[in-house]
Amino acid sequence: MSPLEIAAVATSFLAIWLTARRNMLCWPLNLLACALYYKLFLDVRLYADMVLQAVFGIGILYGWIVWHRGRHGTGAVVVMPLRRLPAMAGLAAGLLGGLAIGWFSSRHTDAALPWTDATLSSFSLVAQYWTARRHSESWLLWIAVDVVYVGMFAFKGLFLTAGLYTVMIGLAVMGYRRWRHVRN
């Protein structure tokens, strides 16, 4: 457990908690958490997750804009339903992305867990996109991804991060319940 991991965990926890509450401050904190985890994942050779943090940075800027535009007159962020076809397309993209990134990582890098890391990274991008689009179903995908992340981080000795992801499962359950309740 390093000071970097502690800072990344604390920032991520607060950012996810604010996301579940549909608070706009989640976006700058998520951006900071991405930067911290980028460095941490570089240090432990989880390259797909490292690159994922950079892509998340772009996605966070996108989400920040979408959420800013998608608010009621009261300032509350509007939750949108996820239709069946876009849901299936997102899951297919996650699978194909995991296969492509896993293939590349397993052949061209010294990644510690290329297939697991790639698959989780790919589906995390789908979940991030769904979160940016304000779909309550994003939380269900986050739950599934985070369960596997807990095991991967524990295996890599990132126990504080594994603990964070365990807590994030609970936050995702909370987020799903809250977002489901306010969905139009």
Image: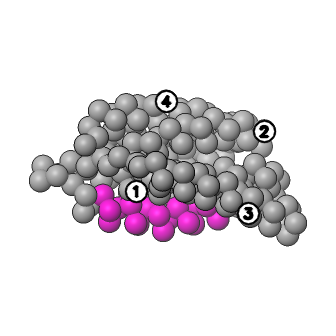
Q: CA distance from mark 4 to mark 1?
A: 20 Å
**Label located before the other in sequence (4 or 2):** 2
Do the CB atoms of the residues marked 4 and 2 lie less than 8 Å apart?
no
Q: CA distance from mark 2 to mark 3?
A: 21 Å
**Mark 1 burial class by Cα count in 10 Å: few <14, some 14-19, many 20+:** some
Do the CB atoms of the residues marked 2 and 1 lie less than 8 Å apart?
no
Secondary structure mainly formed by the magenta segment = helix
Left or right side of 52 for 42: right
Q: CA distance from mark 2 to mark 1?
A: 30 Å
Q: Magenta stretch?
A: 48-67
Q: Amino acid at mark 4?
A: Gly
Colouring method of the image: one colour
- Quarter containing the N terminus: top right
**Label located before the other in sequence (3 or 1):** 3
**Label located before the other in sequence (4 or 1):** 1
The answer to whether residue 124 of the structure is visible from this angle is no
Q: Is residue 177 magenta?
A: no
The residue under label 4 is 170
Q: Amino acid at mark 1?
A: Ala
Residue 8: percent from left, percent from top? 55, 49
The residue drawn where x is 12% and y is 49% is: 74
The residue under label 2 is 155
Residue mark closest to the camera, 3 vs 4: 3
